[in-house]
Amino acid sequence: MTRKYKRNPHQHLINLIHATLKLHGLTLSDIAKYLGISYIHMASLSNGARKISGLSIEKQRALAKFLGISMVEFFLLCGLLRQEDMIAQ
């Protein structure tokens, strides 16, 4: 019997978080402190148990800044915005 796994829509963003942490020699605790959230909350975000899009807009902005990406890129990676949304119909 094969299982079908639901793909996490935030996986690209989660991968970017882990890559950025590794690049700068930081930990989940470091980014949690930067965002003003608990380590447990950050761990839940980074393993896909909680949706990153559920963060407040202020925390989303801080995370985007930490990652060095624009809010548009952030929304695209969160699945809140699609490329086709940027083209007038």
Image: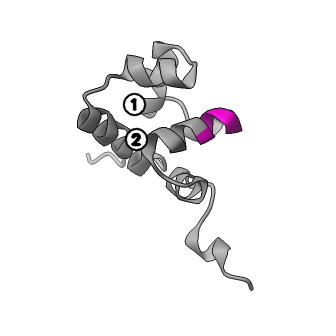
Quick one: label 1, few (<14), some, or many (20+) residues within 10 Å? some
Q: Is residue 7 visible?
A: no
The image quarter in which residue 48 lies: top left
- In this image, 32 relative to 56: left or right? left
Q: Is residue 20 above or below residue 33?
A: below
Say whether disc 2 or disc 1 marks the residue closer to the N-terminus.
2
Q: Look at the image and name its color scheme.
A: one colour
Where is residue 89? Give x, y as percent: 74, 85
Disc 1 residue type (three-letter): Asn
Q: Disc 2 and disc 1: Cα gap in Å?
A: 8 Å
Q: Magenta span has 57? A: yes
Where is residue 76? Give x, y as percent: 54, 59
Q: Is residue 27 above or below residue 3?
A: above
The foreground one among 31 and 9 is 31
Q: Magenta span has 14? A: no
Identify the element where label 2 is drawn. Answer: helix
The foreground one among 13 and 72 is 72
The foreground one among 84 and 49 is 84
Measuring 60% from the left and 39% from the top, which residue is drawn there? Answer: 60
Residue that carries the numbered disc 2 in the rendered image: 14
The foreground one among 69 and 78 is 69
- In this image, 75 relative to 27: left or right? right
Residue that carries the numbered disc 1 in the rendered image: 47
Magenta stretch? 56-61
Query: Mark 2 touching mark 1, by CB under 8 A?
Result: yes
Q: Is residue 61 visible?
A: yes
Identify the element where label 1 is drawn. Answer: loop
Measuring 27% from the left and 48% from the top, which residue is drawn there? Answer: 2
